[in-house]
Image: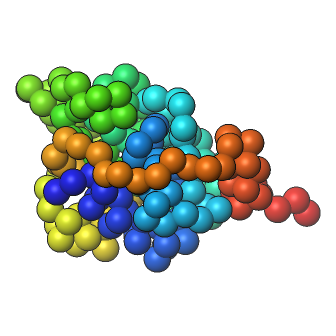
Amino acid sequence: MKRIDAIIEIAAKAKESDAMLVGNIGIPCRELHSVCDTPGNFYMLGSMGLASSIGLGLALTRPDKKVIAIEGDGSVLMNMGSLATIASHDLHNYLLVIVDNGSYGSTGNQPTATSMNTDLAAIAKGAGNRQVSVVDTPGDLRKILQTMDNGIIVVKAEPGNSTAPVITMGPEEILKRFMDISSRPSH
């Protein structure tokens, strides 16, 4: 499976469940934007390793909303402490999907530690996460997304990027439209 195939399935789940969706740095954000751009998507254009933490913060502040974060293996390796923090909160409304393609896709497909012997699902379980699944086909991802609303899914994918176009919105516009969707209404 390619990362874009996983993003198509994740975006469909987010749309179906009216979830806020936090995208990983760089090209994965471009791929998400090309597949399904909505004001409920937050594109992490330049903050590697933070999609999982931002998604967790959203889920904590908006327990009434589903939150899905898409993170890459390189980003999770950069911020592995987020896996323990996610486990300590065990939220019903937060799903982290790690697309593990064994490479740093946005910087030239250099191999990550997961291309050798690092197992992110085992690390997530070791950090205390009770619901951790691993899939490697679009059909299996679609099936697990139908039944799993919280926890961590590790999607095994091939290295490589699609030819998704650059996002034309600037960071300020992305933030404003996302804040309009994600902010709690004042009473």
Whether residue 69 is visible here, answered yes or no, is no
State the residue in front, 110 or 138. Answer: 110
Task: Classify the position of the N terminus by image quarter.
Answer: bottom left
Could you tell me how many numbered marks the image carries?
Answer: 0
Horizontal side of 43 relative to 119 (left or right) equals right
Q: Residue lying farthest left?
A: 117
Task: Classify the position of the C terminus by image quarter.
Answer: bottom right
State the residue in front, 112 or 17. Answer: 112
Compared with 62, 147 (above or below) is below
Whether residue 187 is visible here, answered yes or no, is yes
Compared with 57, 47 (above or below) is above
Horizontal side of 138 relative to 68 (left or right) equals left
Q: Residue at x 54, y 31 (%)?
A: 46
The image position of residue 148, as x and y in percent, is 32, 65
Compared with 113, 172 (above or below) is below
State the residue in front, 172 or 63. Answer: 172
Q: Residue at x 35, y 28 (%)?
A: 107
> In the rendered image, which quarter is residue 144 located in?
bottom left
Q: Residue lying farthest right?
A: 187
The image position of residue 114, as x and y in percent, is 16, 30
The image position of residue 85, as x and y in percent, is 44, 33
Horizontal side of 109 relative to 17 (left or right) equals left
Q: Residue at x 31, y 73 (%)?
A: 146
The image position of residue 48, as x and y in percent, is 46, 29
Q: Residue at x 41, y 43 (%)?
A: 27
> In the rendered image, which quarter is residue 82 located in?
top left
Color style of the picture: rainbow
